[in-house]
Image (tube, rainbow, N blue to C red):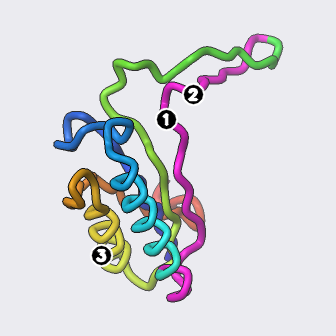
Amino acid sequence: MKYMLLMQFSSQTLDVPQIGEWQPEEIGAHIAFMKTTNEKLAAAGELVDAQGLAMPDTARIVKAGADGSPLVTDGPFAETKEFLAGWWIVDVDTADRAIEIAAEVSAAPGPGGRPINMPIEVREVMAEPPTDL
């Protein structure tokens, strides 16, 4: 079964400074942890994909105009309380294994090497539409 693990960042749920305020060696340790995690998941045959996302201030919101042309606006905006920082798609035998991976990733190091315990949303990737509709 495939699961998407969504790395959520929020000033409401994380008691750490924003990553832009970390020391370079703290950022390096955090990135090294993520790379090592991805290598372990790949070696176990569980990694489908993993990506980090640029900060929200670089995002654009796109909607189709009346004629189908793109209408582009900035966003999300600075007042956004939380944002998606990245994801993993894993292919594992059980939901428990996906949850176990999420807990490991949640403990990525932050300032001072302490685990940041970020929330990781775990969602099964649908293989087909639900049959109960």
Q: Residue at x 40, y 68 (%)?
A: 33
Which residue is the site of mark 2?
A: 58
Sequence order check, earlier mark of 3 and 2: 2
Going by the numbered disc 1, the residue's amino acid type is: Met
What SS does tag 3 mark? Answer: helix
> What residue range appears in magenta?
41-66
Name the N-terminal-most of marks 3 and 1.
Answer: 1
Q: Residue at x 50, y 77 (%)?
A: 1
Q: Is residue 86 magenta?
A: no
Q: Quadrant of residue 34?
A: bottom left
Q: Residues within 10 Å of mark 3 (few under 14, many from 20)?
A: few
**Disc 2/disc 1 C-alpha distance (Å):** 6 Å
Q: Amino acid at mark 2?
A: Thr
Residue that carries the numbered disc 1 in the rendered image:
55
Residue 88 percent across, percent down from the top left: 49, 63
Q: Secondary structure at mark 2?
A: helix
> What's the CA distance linking mark 3 and mark 2?
32 Å
> Most extreme residue toward the bottom, as rendered?
44
Mark 2 near mark 1, Cβ–Cβ under 8 Å?
yes
Q: Secondary structure at mark 1?
A: loop
Q: Residues within 10 Å of mark 1 (few under 14, many from 20)?
A: few
Residue toward you, 33 or 80: 33
For residue 100, the mark is: 3
Mark 3 belongs to which amino acid? Glu
Question: Does the magenta-highlighted stretch encompass residue 44?
Answer: yes
Q: 10 Å neighbourhood of mark 2: few (<14), some, or many (≥20)? A: few
